Amino acid sequence: MLFRLALRARTLKPTAFKLTALLTAVALAVSPVVPARAQQKGPPVLRDTESEQLLREYTRPILRAAGLEKQNIQIVIINDGSFNAFVADGRRIFVNYGALLQSETPNQIIGVLAHETGHLAGGHLAKMREQLAQAQTQMIIAMLLGVGALAAGAASGVGNGLSSAGAAAISAPQSVIQRTLLSYQRQQEENADRAGVKFLNATGQSAKGMYETFKRFTDESLFAARGADPYLQSHPMPVDRVSALADLARSSPYWDKKDDPALQLRHDMMRAKISGFMERQDTVYRRYPLSNTSLPARYARAITTYLHGDLRSAIAQIDGLIQVQPNNPYFYELRGQALLEGGRPAEAIAPLRRAVQLSGSSPLIEMLLGQALVASDNKAYTDDAINMLRAAVAREPEAPLGYTQLAMAYGRKGDYAQADLASAQAAYLRGDNKTARELASRAKTRFAIGTPGWVKADDIVSAKPMPGQKNN
């Protein structure tokens, strides 16, 4: 199931000068700037068990090689169609769905993930914060000196001469400090490239995918970079960077190693799923025309068919996929999701139960099954739904959908205290702090003082807004 969640926005204290690319995150794999949405309130996150499982398998050996296996590093898919990846804290790698869609082989996106792991392993975020703190101190001193010069000019009556000198004393250090910070970040990018290749070599994987990705974007950005000041770039100049990476990658004994065909198929299925859910129907059919009878093409067409209202045709196509791979949990998940969203929740329960079983009880699929159980209007399913949803939110505590469905199930059972609490948790996760506090306050009146439910409700009432959210 591919659905959107709001990402907890992380705001950063402004510096005395504008360094947007530096302040937002360290190190995009290719692009020199974080997308505008990521710089503001934080873009929505896309959740999908199939894609996330594959990305975990891609990163696990790299994280092990980097000594980060026990750090619980998460891969977060961002709802942005551009090719981009970045790290914005010490425990998550953010990847735009556009990067997944445009990476033609597993090795290409693995190379990007290896590069971002290089930033995590190098502690670049913490080091950049130190550099920014030092820059702020330098900037404050420079500004004070500049203001002093301006004041001296005004007091002496000299006028424009010293005033201009004061203005220059303010602006000149800004340029020097900005160049220093950008130079530092360029060095971090080069270090991340080298670390990424090192991790790939340690895991017996080729760095060709990383090189191919960077080379493609170098060719596309070559014209845009023409005439650019290399000292005002947050990333190494494209040609220089790719040249250095080529020498490093080609020296690997695994340069010509190919991706496993089974892994390539799973990668192609992920790309097809993203295309089916995220692209226009005409775009999907151009990418996967009817003449293409491959499994990924059929997957993409089945998804876009159900999304555009032809449920009967979609179910027939999905059943055809199940015949080819009868133990693929994500085909059953898709069948259940199509039936649920097509207004047939009772029929969605069986395929979703099968999907939960085959997926090893994925919490996201459990939430979808819980939604079908609640929507079926069969009170006999209420306890089943509650147990299923409680287990799901325990493992996915930041998914509002699970709490929303849990609230409905408790409401059907007449347990209004738990229903209010679950609704409050869902509202809090959506960033609706006012509603969350109101519901949690009401829940407190329904629970006995000091009970676990009362304590959770009290936590929400007294909780501060998430970073980046208003205390409305």
Image (cartoon, grey):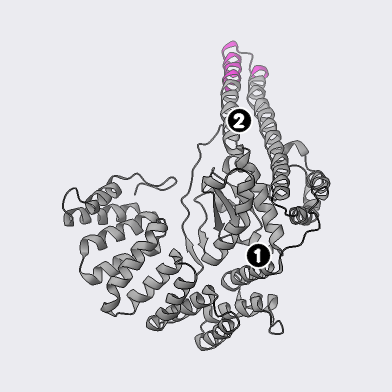
Q: Residues within 10 Å of mark 2 (few under 14, many from 20)?
A: some
Is 419 situated above or below 297?
above
**Relative to residue 387, is residue 220 drawn left or right?**
right
Helix, strand or loop at disc 2? Answer: helix
Q: Is residue 154 magenta?
A: yes
Could you say which disc has been placed on residue 101 in the image?
Answer: 1
| Residue 235 appears in the rendering | no
Q: Quadrant of residue 130?
A: top right
Q: Position of residue 352 (x, y in %)?
A: 44, 76
Q: How many marks?
A: 2
Instruction: Give the residue type at disc 2.
Output: Gln
Is 378 situated above or below 471?
below
**Residue, x 29% and y 65% (percent of image)?**
407
Q: Between 279 and 258, which is closer to the camera in this rendering?
A: 258
Residue range of the region highlighted in magenta in the rendering: 143-162
**Residue, x 61% and y 82% (percent of image)?**
324
Label 1 to label 2, Cα distance in Å? Answer: 35 Å
Q: Is residue 72 magenta?
A: no
- Of helix, strand and loop, which mostly describes the magenta segment? helix
Between disc 1 and disc 2, whose residue precedes?
A: 1
Q: Position of residue 243 (x, y in %)?
A: 83, 46
**Residue, x 28% and y 71% (percent of image)?**
383
Q: Position of residue 206 (x, y in %)?
A: 75, 54
- Dot 2 corresponds to which residue? 131
Q: Residues within 10 Å of mark 1 (few under 14, many from 20)?
A: many
Is 86 situated above or below 404?
above
Helix, strand or loop at disc 1? Answer: helix
Q: Position of residue 245 (x, y in %)?
A: 79, 46
Instruction: Give the residue type at disc 1.
Output: Leu
Is 295 situated above or below 207?
below
| Residue 133 appears in the rendering | yes
Q: Between 323 and 470, which is closer to the camera in this rendering?
A: 323
